[in-house]
Image (spheres, coloured by chain):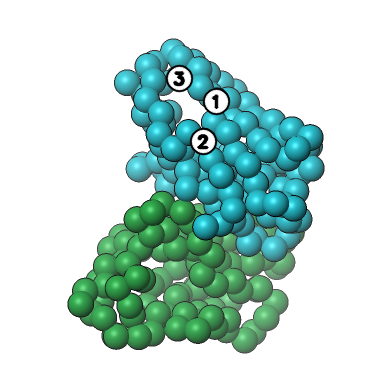
Chain colours: A cyan, B green
Amino acid sequence: DSGVTQTPKHLITATGQRVTLRCSPRSGDLSVYWYQQSLDQGLQFLIQYYNGEERAKGNILERFSAQQFPDLHSELNLSSLELGDSALYFCASSFGQGTGELFFGEGSRLTVL
Amino acid sequence: AQTVTQSQPEMSVQEAETVTLSCTYDTSENNYYLFWYKQPPSRQMILVIRQEAYKQQNATENRFSVNFQKAAKSFSLKISDSQLGDTAMYFCAFMKGNTDKLIFGTGTRLQVFP
């Protein structure tokens, strides 16, 4: 168990809808990362937060947004969902920056029908 | 831009044998780190091993070791005495400097047979 908790584990929704994925990092970790894993694109970095502030941005669509709250949990909001958004969304956490040692959650599998 | 290439989509090995997974990368950076992550059927990504580019010595973690060839931009993972629990997807990853932004390869699915 990595100590990173993601909810929900599975989610099925329709095109055009909006969903929120939640992540609780390991106790004491200040950084939260979001990754998208799809069959055709592999693991793609979406965004990183450090102690509540956005620190790095990757290939995150404008329809997607994220935030990290004062208690350090994070939410990833996906809106106007399309079929291609179906993927496994991982949250990871680390204490600081620069180690590359991320602790991953079990992921949230999103299916858009 | 950095890229990570894993040219072996699938590999198999018999229990107790040794297997090597390949990874090449492309970067113009001097300060970077390389990683192997494991994703078992439980889906959770787990760090296997980490290599700092400035270190010439190859990293080892118990049965896992790497062959880091900096000039060739190659970073292979050797698993010795393979165990059934090693069955998983293995991802090679690159990180520039102190960014914590990992760039992953497409993965190699390893099956360990009894």
| Front residue of A40 and A68 | A68
1 or 2: tag closer to the N-terminus: 2
Mark 3 and mark 2 in contact? Answer it, CB < 8 Å.
no
A84 versus B57 height, above or below: above
> In the image, which disc is placed on residue A20?
1
Which residue is found at the position 53% from the left and 40% from the top? A6
Q: Secondary structure at mark 1?
A: strand
Which residue is found at the position 70% from the left and 77% from the top? B54
Q: Amino acid at mark 1?
A: Thr
Label 2 chain ID: A
Number of the front mark, 1 or 2: 2
Residue B17 is left or right of residue B29, and the answer is left
Q: CA distance from mark 3 to mark 2?
A: 18 Å
Which residue is found at the position 61% from the left and 74% from the top? B51
Q: Secondary structure at mark 3?
A: loop
Q: Which residue is mark 3?
A: A81
Q: Give how far across and how far down residue A72 sits, in percent.
A: 73, 40
Label 3 chain ID: A
A91 versus A69 height, above or below: below
